[in-house]
């Protein structure tokens, strides 16, 4: 058995779309039934448990998984493995794969693509590469989707050399990569701090007949940002419109992050200010990164101003609010503004958000730097009481 006991019949019936119910008549062939189940499984979204149950139900209904219906049977398994992949359930995807082999159903390139994706999302980059290698052993030729999934998997493991090796293997096997394969490879390089390799990749795309899109530029800019190469990040931002590619909020957020890492808080704020003029609306990540740049530069006035400009409605999660006010308090602490730091601490409490230990520590430090030892001691006592009471962690 692949899954838990079957759900009540009425629950299953409620899940079936009207057109699917109509197809399930007594004259339905095994092939038609498998196609129907494959469509039903594909419509489940992230319900991997129901997907596995339906695979079992196909077999319990007496449908053979070999002969003329073997290929159709593969679509049922592939649909279920894809659902598991979307949910990051690589182990369950593997169980489905083992079950289909046991039942005599041969996996196709689409099955392997879904399996490799499942392994990648589950952090199993080694298994993803093993599957890609195994495809060649059994005569299933990997397509661009398989390679893209495998390169994405090794990217998460910061295996940049392996990512480039897989990209070269595609060329050797006459499998043309698409833009998203390059995005995956550049992400692998960026995660490993190999920003030069990422830039080489995006520079070489036109020669292979592939036009870099906004996702490619975002991956290359992110690689620069992760290594603090803010000047290169801004150069790419500037060249994008010249090449018919328009930056989005992710592009700007990565560039602002690059400036923050390079202690270029002025540049970070200039980018933030330019976004509305260029038709791009800042999101929570953009604001947080810009605020962090102010914190790094000790620009308390700009940090407080930015905090006031940010959306602060009830939809803002407490942890996001804590991060923002903590960054502003840190900027005040660096600027010796103890009164403003205490004002921000009070604002946080008025919003019903409990300050964490880092917030207290920054406010305490601000008071000490301002010669307000009594206030610092009082805050320290409040913090200690909250730690001992279990309200916050040390």
Image: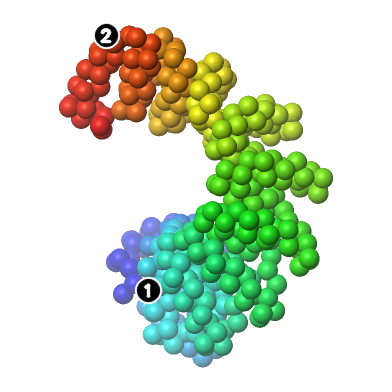
Disc 1 on helix, strand or loop? helix
In the image, taking residue 149 as reference, residue 208 lies left or right, namely right
**What residue is shown at x 52% (from left), y 88% (from top)?**
138
Which x, y percent locates residue 55? 42, 72
Q: Is residue 45 visible?
A: yes
Is residue 72 among the parts visible in the rendering? Answer: no
Q: Please tell me whether mark 1 or mark 2 is closer to you in this view.
A: 2
**Secondary element at image label 2:** helix
Left or right: 186 with respect to 278?
left
Residue named by callout 1? 95
The quadrant the N terminus occupies is bottom left
Front-most of residues 72 and 182: 182
Whole-percent x and y of residue 376?
Answer: 29, 14
Of residue 17 and residue 217, the one placed in the foreground of this image is 217
14 up-or-down from 23: above or below: above
Image: 111 above or below 315: below
How far apart marks 1 and 2 lie (CA) works out to 63 Å
């Amino acid at each position: 058995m692949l899954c838990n006991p079957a759900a009540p019949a009425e629950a299953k019936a409620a899940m079936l779309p009207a057109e699917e119910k109509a197809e399930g008549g007594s004259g339905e062939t095994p092939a038609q039934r498998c196609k129907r189940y494959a469509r039903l499984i594909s419509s489940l979204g992230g319900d991997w448990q129901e997907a596995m149950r339906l695979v079992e139900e196909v077999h319990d209904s007496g449908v053979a998984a070999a002969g003329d219906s073997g290929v159709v049977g593969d679509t049922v398994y592939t649909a279920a493995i894809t659902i598991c992949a979307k949910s990051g359930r690589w182990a369950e995807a593997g169980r489905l794969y083992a079950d289909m082999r046991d039942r005599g159903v041969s996996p196709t390139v689409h099955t392997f693509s879904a399996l490799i994706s499942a392994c990648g999302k589950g952090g199993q980059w080694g298994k993803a590469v093993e599957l890609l290698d195994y495809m060649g052993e059994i005569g299933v030729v990997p397509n661009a989707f398989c390679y893209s999934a495998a390169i994405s998997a090794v990217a998460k493991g910061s295996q940049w050399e392996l990512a480039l090796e897989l990209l070269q293997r595609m060329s050797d096997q006459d499998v043309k990569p698409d833009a998203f394969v390059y995005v995956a490879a550049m992400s692998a390089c960026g995660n490993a701090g190999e920003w030069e390799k990422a830039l080489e990749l995006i520079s070489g795309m036109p020669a292979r007949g592939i036009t870099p899109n906004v996702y490619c530029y975002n991956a290359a800019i992110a690689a620069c940002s992760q290594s603090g190469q803010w000047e290169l990040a801004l150069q790419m931002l500037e060249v994008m419109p010249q090449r018919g590619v328009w930056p989005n909020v992710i592009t700007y957020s990565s560039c602002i992050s690059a400036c923050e890492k390079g202690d270029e808080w002025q540049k970070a704020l200039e980018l933030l200010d330019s976004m509305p003029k260029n038709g791009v609306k800042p999101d929570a990540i953009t604001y947080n990164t810009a605020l962090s740049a102010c914190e790094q530069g000790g620009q308390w006035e700009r940090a407080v101003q930015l905090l006031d400009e940010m959306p602060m409605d009830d939809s803002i999660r407490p942890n996001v609010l804590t991060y923002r006010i903590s960054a502003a308090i840190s900027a005040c602490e660096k600027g010796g503004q103890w009164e403003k730091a205490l004002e921000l601490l009070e604002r946080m409490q008025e919003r019903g958000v409990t300050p964490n230990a880092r917030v207290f520590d920054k406010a305490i430090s601000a008071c000490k730097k301002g010669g307000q030892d009594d206030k610092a001691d009082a805050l320290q006592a409040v913090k200690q009481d909250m730690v001992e009471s279990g309200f916050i962690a040390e």
